[in-house]
Amino acid sequence: MATPLQDLLPLEHPIIQAPMAGGATTVELVSEASRAGCLGSLGAAYLGAAQIEAAAAAIRERTPRPFAINLFAAVPEQPMRGDGGNMLALLARFHARLGLPAPEAPGPQADLLPGQIEAVLRVRPAVFSFTFGRMPREALARCRELGILTVGTATTVREALALQEDGVDAVVAQGAEAGGHRGTFLDDFDSALIGTMALVPQVADALRIPVIASGGIMDGRGIAAALALGAQAAQMGTAFLCADESGIPEAYKAALPASQAEQSRITRAYSGRPARGLVNDFMRETDAISADIYPYPQQNALTRPMRTAGARLGDISVLSLWAGQGAPLARRESTAALVARLAAELADARRRAGG
Protein backbone atom coordinates (compact mmCIF):
# COMPACT_ATOMS: atom_id res chain seq x y z
CA MET A 1 0.00 0.00 0.00
CA ALA A 2 3.05 2.28 0.12
CA THR A 3 3.21 5.15 -2.36
CA PRO A 4 6.28 5.66 -4.58
CA LEU A 5 7.27 8.68 -2.48
CA GLN A 6 7.17 6.55 0.67
CA ASP A 7 9.46 4.00 -0.95
CA LEU A 8 11.82 6.70 -2.19
CA LEU A 9 12.47 8.35 1.17
CA PRO A 10 11.61 5.74 2.71
CA LEU A 11 8.72 6.27 5.15
CA GLU A 12 6.48 3.88 7.05
CA HIS A 13 3.51 6.21 6.70
CA PRO A 14 2.48 8.64 3.91
CA ILE A 15 2.65 11.51 6.39
CA ILE A 16 4.83 14.60 6.50
CA GLN A 17 4.95 16.67 9.68
CA ALA A 18 4.72 20.17 8.24
CA PRO A 19 7.63 22.57 8.67
CA MET A 20 6.32 25.41 10.84
CA ALA A 21 8.84 28.21 11.35
CA GLY A 22 9.03 30.26 14.51
CA GLY A 23 9.72 27.61 17.13
CA ALA A 24 6.93 25.05 16.73
CA THR A 25 9.11 22.44 15.04
CA THR A 26 11.55 21.69 17.83
CA VAL A 27 14.34 19.16 17.54
CA GLU A 28 12.18 16.86 19.68
CA LEU A 29 9.10 17.17 17.45
CA VAL A 30 11.03 16.61 14.21
CA SER A 31 12.99 13.63 15.53
CA GLU A 32 9.92 12.02 17.14
CA ALA A 33 7.91 12.39 13.92
CA SER A 34 10.72 10.77 11.92
CA ARG A 35 11.21 8.03 14.53
CA ALA A 36 7.49 7.25 14.28
CA GLY A 37 7.80 6.62 10.54
CA CYS A 38 6.79 10.01 9.12
CA LEU A 39 8.97 12.69 7.56
CA GLY A 40 9.79 15.17 10.31
CA SER A 41 10.41 18.70 9.04
CA LEU A 42 12.40 21.53 10.62
CA GLY A 43 10.95 24.98 9.91
CA ALA A 44 14.26 26.85 9.61
CA ALA A 45 13.24 30.07 7.88
CA TYR A 46 14.14 32.25 10.89
CA LEU A 47 17.30 30.36 11.83
CA GLY A 48 20.84 31.35 10.98
CA ALA A 49 23.24 28.95 9.27
CA ALA A 50 24.89 27.86 12.53
CA GLN A 51 21.50 27.25 14.14
CA ILE A 52 20.42 25.08 11.21
CA GLU A 53 23.55 22.98 11.45
CA ALA A 54 23.20 22.61 15.22
CA ALA A 55 19.55 21.58 14.96
CA ALA A 56 20.30 19.03 12.23
CA ALA A 57 23.08 17.52 14.33
CA ALA A 58 20.74 17.28 17.32
CA ILE A 59 18.05 15.56 15.23
CA ARG A 60 20.59 13.04 13.95
CA GLU A 61 21.68 12.31 17.50
CA ARG A 62 18.10 11.23 18.20
CA THR A 63 17.28 9.30 15.03
CA PRO A 64 18.96 8.02 11.85
CA ARG A 65 15.71 8.35 9.94
CA PRO A 66 15.15 10.90 7.16
CA PHE A 67 14.02 14.45 7.91
CA ALA A 68 13.46 17.68 5.98
CA ILE A 69 14.67 21.25 6.37
CA ASN A 70 12.39 24.01 5.11
CA LEU A 71 13.21 27.61 4.12
CA PHE A 72 11.33 30.61 2.78
CA ALA A 73 12.17 31.55 -0.81
CA ALA A 74 13.22 35.14 -1.44
CA VAL A 75 10.31 37.50 -2.10
CA PRO A 76 10.46 40.88 -3.87
CA GLU A 77 10.56 43.84 -1.51
CA GLN A 78 7.33 45.82 -1.40
CA PRO A 79 7.09 49.53 -0.58
CA MET A 80 5.09 50.79 2.40
CA ARG A 81 1.90 52.16 0.83
CA GLY A 82 -0.14 53.11 3.90
CA ASP A 83 0.40 55.27 6.97
CA GLY A 84 2.97 53.51 9.15
CA GLY A 85 2.15 55.90 11.96
CA ASN A 86 -1.27 54.29 12.37
CA MET A 87 0.30 50.85 12.64
CA LEU A 88 2.85 52.06 15.20
CA ALA A 89 0.14 53.76 17.27
CA LEU A 90 -1.99 50.61 17.35
CA LEU A 91 0.99 48.43 18.27
CA ALA A 92 2.05 50.92 20.97
CA ARG A 93 -1.20 50.24 22.84
CA PHE A 94 -0.48 46.50 22.88
CA HIS A 95 3.13 47.16 23.91
CA ALA A 96 1.97 49.25 26.84
CA ARG A 97 -0.36 46.47 27.95
CA LEU A 98 2.55 44.00 27.87
CA GLY A 99 5.03 46.35 29.57
CA LEU A 100 7.13 46.81 26.43
CA PRO A 101 8.73 50.04 25.18
CA ALA A 102 7.04 51.86 22.31
CA PRO A 103 7.66 50.24 18.91
CA GLU A 104 9.85 51.84 16.26
CA ALA A 105 9.45 51.75 12.50
CA PRO A 106 11.20 48.67 11.11
CA GLY A 107 14.25 49.09 8.90
CA PRO A 108 15.62 46.85 6.12
CA GLN A 109 15.77 43.17 7.04
CA ALA A 110 18.87 41.03 6.54
CA ASP A 111 18.73 38.39 3.81
CA LEU A 112 19.53 35.09 5.53
CA LEU A 113 18.70 32.86 2.56
CA PRO A 114 22.12 32.47 0.87
CA GLY A 115 23.75 31.37 4.13
CA GLN A 116 20.79 29.16 4.98
CA ILE A 117 21.00 27.36 1.63
CA GLU A 118 24.72 26.71 2.12
CA ALA A 119 23.98 25.31 5.58
CA VAL A 120 21.35 22.95 4.14
CA LEU A 121 23.82 21.75 1.52
CA ARG A 122 26.43 21.08 4.20
CA VAL A 123 23.93 19.25 6.42
CA ARG A 124 22.50 17.18 3.54
CA PRO A 125 19.05 16.31 4.94
CA ALA A 126 16.96 13.77 3.06
CA VAL A 127 14.65 16.56 1.87
CA PHE A 128 15.02 20.31 1.28
CA SER A 129 11.57 21.91 1.11
CA PHE A 130 10.62 25.53 0.59
CA THR A 131 7.68 27.89 0.28
CA PHE A 132 6.87 31.49 -0.80
CA GLY A 133 8.29 31.00 -4.29
CA ARG A 134 11.06 29.44 -6.36
CA MET A 135 14.61 28.57 -5.41
CA PRO A 136 17.60 29.34 -7.64
CA ARG A 137 18.02 26.53 -10.14
CA GLU A 138 21.68 26.20 -9.22
CA ALA A 139 20.67 25.44 -5.62
CA LEU A 140 18.25 22.76 -6.82
CA ALA A 141 20.98 21.31 -9.06
CA ARG A 142 23.41 21.13 -6.15
CA CYS A 143 20.78 19.34 -4.08
CA ARG A 144 20.36 16.82 -6.88
CA GLU A 145 24.12 16.21 -6.98
CA LEU A 146 24.12 15.59 -3.22
CA GLY A 147 21.11 13.28 -3.28
CA ILE A 148 18.80 15.76 -1.48
CA LEU A 149 15.17 15.61 -2.63
CA THR A 150 13.64 19.04 -3.26
CA VAL A 151 10.02 19.95 -2.56
CA GLY A 152 8.36 23.26 -3.44
CA THR A 153 4.98 24.65 -2.38
CA ALA A 154 2.23 25.62 -4.83
CA THR A 155 -1.26 27.01 -4.35
CA THR A 156 -2.31 26.80 -8.02
CA VAL A 157 -1.68 24.47 -10.95
CA ARG A 158 0.32 27.22 -12.66
CA GLU A 159 2.67 27.46 -9.69
CA ALA A 160 3.02 23.67 -9.53
CA LEU A 161 3.99 23.52 -13.20
CA ALA A 162 6.56 26.28 -12.69
CA LEU A 163 8.15 24.34 -9.82
CA GLN A 164 8.23 21.16 -11.91
CA GLU A 165 9.92 23.09 -14.70
CA ASP A 166 12.52 24.31 -12.20
CA GLY A 167 13.39 20.69 -11.44
CA VAL A 168 11.91 19.97 -8.01
CA ASP A 169 11.31 16.33 -7.08
CA ALA A 170 7.83 16.85 -5.58
CA VAL A 171 5.27 19.59 -4.99
CA VAL A 172 3.15 20.38 -1.94
CA ALA A 173 -0.33 21.42 -3.08
CA GLN A 174 -1.37 23.86 -0.34
CA GLY A 175 -5.13 24.22 -0.11
CA ALA A 176 -6.95 27.26 1.20
CA GLU A 177 -7.72 25.45 4.48
CA ALA A 178 -4.03 25.28 5.44
CA GLY A 179 -2.80 27.12 8.52
CA GLY A 180 0.05 29.57 8.54
CA HIS A 181 1.50 31.51 5.64
CA ARG A 182 0.21 31.12 2.13
CA GLY A 183 2.77 29.82 -0.36
CA THR A 184 1.34 31.80 -3.29
CA PHE A 185 3.96 33.34 -5.57
CA LEU A 186 2.64 33.66 -9.15
CA ASP A 187 -1.02 34.54 -8.65
CA ASP A 188 -2.69 37.01 -6.32
CA PHE A 189 -3.59 35.62 -2.91
CA ASP A 190 -7.34 35.86 -3.26
CA SER A 191 -7.53 34.00 -6.56
CA ALA A 192 -5.17 31.32 -5.22
CA LEU A 193 -7.48 30.35 -2.33
CA ILE A 194 -8.39 26.99 -3.85
CA GLY A 195 -9.61 24.27 -1.49
CA THR A 196 -7.51 21.16 -0.96
CA MET A 197 -10.16 18.82 -2.40
CA ALA A 198 -10.25 20.86 -5.62
CA LEU A 199 -6.55 21.66 -5.88
CA VAL A 200 -4.90 18.27 -5.26
CA PRO A 201 -6.48 16.29 -8.13
CA GLN A 202 -5.86 19.13 -10.59
CA VAL A 203 -2.20 19.35 -9.60
CA ALA A 204 -1.85 15.55 -9.63
CA ASP A 205 -3.29 15.42 -13.16
CA ALA A 206 -0.99 18.21 -14.38
CA LEU A 207 2.33 16.96 -12.97
CA ARG A 208 4.56 13.97 -13.69
CA ILE A 209 6.22 14.21 -10.24
CA PRO A 210 4.74 13.31 -6.81
CA VAL A 211 2.18 15.59 -5.20
CA ILE A 212 1.83 16.10 -1.44
CA ALA A 213 -1.54 17.30 -0.16
CA SER A 214 -1.69 20.03 2.50
CA GLY A 215 -4.54 21.91 4.11
CA GLY A 216 -7.24 20.84 6.55
CA ILE A 217 -5.95 17.28 6.95
CA MET A 218 -6.25 16.33 10.61
CA ASP A 219 -6.83 12.57 10.82
CA GLY A 220 -6.66 9.29 8.93
CA ARG A 221 -9.83 10.06 7.00
CA GLY A 222 -8.17 13.17 5.59
CA ILE A 223 -5.01 11.26 4.67
CA ALA A 224 -7.09 8.59 2.89
CA ALA A 225 -8.97 11.29 0.98
CA ALA A 226 -5.71 12.97 -0.07
CA LEU A 227 -4.33 9.68 -1.38
CA ALA A 228 -7.58 8.96 -3.21
CA LEU A 229 -7.30 12.35 -4.92
CA GLY A 230 -3.87 11.53 -6.32
CA ALA A 231 -1.48 12.70 -3.60
CA GLN A 232 1.37 10.43 -2.52
CA ALA A 233 1.52 11.84 1.02
CA ALA A 234 -0.30 14.24 3.31
CA GLN A 235 1.52 17.15 4.95
CA MET A 236 0.00 17.97 8.34
CA GLY A 237 0.80 21.02 10.44
CA THR A 238 -2.04 21.93 12.78
CA ALA A 239 -2.41 18.30 13.90
CA PHE A 240 1.20 18.34 15.14
CA LEU A 241 0.96 21.74 16.86
CA CYS A 242 -0.75 20.19 19.88
CA ALA A 243 1.84 17.41 20.22
CA ASP A 244 3.72 17.32 23.51
CA GLU A 245 6.99 18.01 21.68
CA SER A 246 5.70 21.05 19.80
CA GLY A 247 7.37 24.31 20.83
CA ILE A 248 4.31 26.57 20.90
CA PRO A 249 3.09 27.98 24.26
CA GLU A 250 0.66 25.95 26.34
CA ALA A 251 -2.04 28.60 25.98
CA TYR A 252 -1.77 28.28 22.20
CA LYS A 253 -2.03 24.47 22.41
CA ALA A 254 -5.14 24.76 24.56
CA ALA A 255 -6.77 27.24 22.15
CA LEU A 256 -6.68 24.97 19.10
CA PRO A 257 -8.99 22.09 20.11
CA ALA A 258 -11.24 24.58 21.92
CA SER A 259 -11.70 26.67 18.76
CA GLN A 260 -14.40 26.59 16.09
CA ALA A 261 -13.78 26.47 12.35
CA GLU A 262 -15.37 29.87 11.82
CA GLN A 263 -12.67 31.46 14.00
CA SER A 264 -10.12 30.67 11.28
CA ARG A 265 -9.20 33.72 9.24
CA ILE A 266 -6.54 34.90 6.78
CA THR A 267 -4.69 38.02 7.87
CA ARG A 268 -1.61 40.11 7.15
CA ALA A 269 -1.59 41.50 10.68
CA TYR A 270 1.43 39.68 12.05
CA SER A 271 3.88 39.41 9.18
CA GLY A 272 2.61 41.53 6.31
CA ARG A 273 2.01 38.36 4.29
CA PRO A 274 -1.35 36.53 4.18
CA ALA A 275 -1.50 33.69 6.71
CA ARG A 276 -4.32 31.69 8.28
CA GLY A 277 -4.84 31.63 12.03
CA LEU A 278 -7.40 31.97 14.81
CA VAL A 279 -8.82 35.45 15.16
CA ASN A 280 -7.84 37.37 18.30
CA ASP A 281 -7.70 40.97 19.53
CA PHE A 282 -4.55 41.99 17.67
CA MET A 283 -5.67 40.41 14.40
CA ARG A 284 -9.09 42.01 14.63
CA GLU A 285 -7.81 45.53 15.35
CA THR A 286 -5.00 45.36 12.80
CA ASP A 287 -7.25 44.06 10.04
CA ALA A 288 -9.40 47.15 10.63
CA ILE A 289 -6.45 49.28 9.42
CA SER A 290 -5.16 46.75 6.88
CA ALA A 291 -4.07 49.47 4.45
CA ASP A 292 -1.51 50.64 7.03
CA ILE A 293 0.17 47.26 7.65
CA TYR A 294 3.86 47.22 6.76
CA PRO A 295 4.89 44.81 3.98
CA TYR A 296 6.60 41.49 4.67
CA PRO A 297 9.11 41.07 6.27
CA GLN A 298 9.03 44.49 7.98
CA GLN A 299 5.69 43.82 9.68
CA ASN A 300 7.03 40.50 10.91
CA ALA A 301 10.00 42.24 12.53
CA LEU A 302 7.74 44.95 13.97
CA THR A 303 5.42 42.51 15.74
CA ARG A 304 8.14 40.14 16.98
CA PRO A 305 8.65 41.75 20.43
CA MET A 306 4.90 41.66 21.08
CA ARG A 307 4.65 38.03 20.01
CA THR A 308 7.64 37.05 22.14
CA ALA A 309 6.14 38.73 25.19
CA GLY A 310 2.77 37.16 24.49
CA ALA A 311 4.34 33.70 24.35
CA ARG A 312 6.14 34.30 27.65
CA LEU A 313 2.94 35.47 29.34
CA GLY A 314 0.60 32.99 27.67
CA ASP A 315 -1.44 35.88 26.24
CA ILE A 316 -3.23 34.49 23.20
CA SER A 317 -4.78 37.87 22.42
CA VAL A 318 -1.48 38.96 20.86
CA LEU A 319 0.01 35.69 19.61
CA SER A 320 -0.04 34.69 15.96
CA LEU A 321 -2.25 31.63 16.43
CA TRP A 322 -1.47 30.01 13.08
CA ALA A 323 -3.81 27.10 12.46
CA GLY A 324 -5.81 25.54 9.66
CA GLN A 325 -9.56 25.24 9.42
CA GLY A 326 -9.37 21.78 10.96
CA ALA A 327 -8.02 23.10 14.27
CA PRO A 328 -11.06 21.94 16.32
CA LEU A 329 -10.01 18.36 15.48
CA ALA A 330 -6.60 18.77 17.12
CA ARG A 331 -5.78 16.57 20.11
CA ARG A 332 -3.27 16.85 22.95
CA GLU A 333 -0.99 13.81 22.82
CA SER A 334 2.60 12.80 22.21
CA THR A 335 3.95 12.74 18.66
CA ALA A 336 4.33 8.96 18.83
CA ALA A 337 0.71 8.54 19.96
CA LEU A 338 -0.49 10.95 17.27
CA VAL A 339 1.26 9.06 14.48
CA ALA A 340 0.03 5.70 15.78
CA ARG A 341 -3.53 7.03 15.86
CA LEU A 342 -3.23 8.48 12.34
CA ALA A 343 -1.90 5.17 11.00
CA ALA A 344 -4.77 3.25 12.61
CA GLU A 345 -7.35 5.73 11.31
CA LEU A 346 -5.88 5.55 7.80
CA ALA A 347 -6.02 1.76 7.82
CA ASP A 348 -9.62 1.88 9.03
CA ALA A 349 -10.60 4.43 6.37
CA ARG A 350 -9.05 2.26 3.66
CA ARG A 351 -10.88 -0.81 4.93
CA ARG A 352 -14.20 1.04 4.95
CA ALA A 353 -13.55 2.29 1.42
CA GLY A 354 -12.89 -1.26 0.23
CA GLY A 355 -9.09 -1.13 0.27
Image (spheres, rainbow, N blue to C red):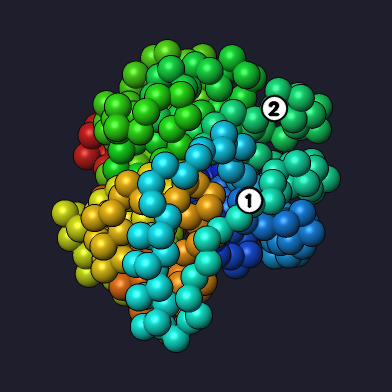
Amino acid beneath label 2? Pro
The residue at the point 31 percent across, 73 percent down is: 317
Mark 1: secondary structure: loop
Left or right for 255, reference 12? left
Mark 2: secondary structure: loop
Query: Residue beneath label 1, please?
Result: 108
Q: Alpha-carbon neighbours of circle 1 within 10 Å: few (<14), some, or many (≥20)?
A: few
Q: Is residue 269 above or below residue 136?
A: below
Amino acid beneath label 1? Pro
- When asked about the image quadrant of residue 46, the answer is bottom right
Q: Nearer the viewer, residue 271 or 119?
A: 271
The residue at the point 75 percent across, 41 percent down is: 114
Q: Nearer the viewer, residue 146 or 262?
A: 262
**Mark 1 and mark 2 in contact (Cβ < 8 Å)?**
no
Left or right for 281, reference 159? left
**Residue 232 x %, y %:** 46, 31
Q: Alpha-carbon neighbours of circle 2 within 10 Å: few (<14), some, or many (≥20)?
A: few
**Residue 251 x %, y %:** 36, 77
Residue 16 in view, yes or no: yes
Query: Residue beneath label 2, please?
Result: 136
Q: Nearer the viewer, mark 2 or mark 1?
A: 1
Q: Is residue 297 above or below residue 145?
A: below
The residue at the point 56 percent across, 38 percent down is: 77
Q: Is residue 207 above or below residue 20?
A: above
Q: Nearer the viewer, residue 262 or 129?
A: 262
- When asked about the image quadrant of residue 129, the answer is top right
**Residue 289 x %, y %:** 28, 54
Left or right for 245, reference 8? left
Q: Quadrant of the C terminus?
A: top left
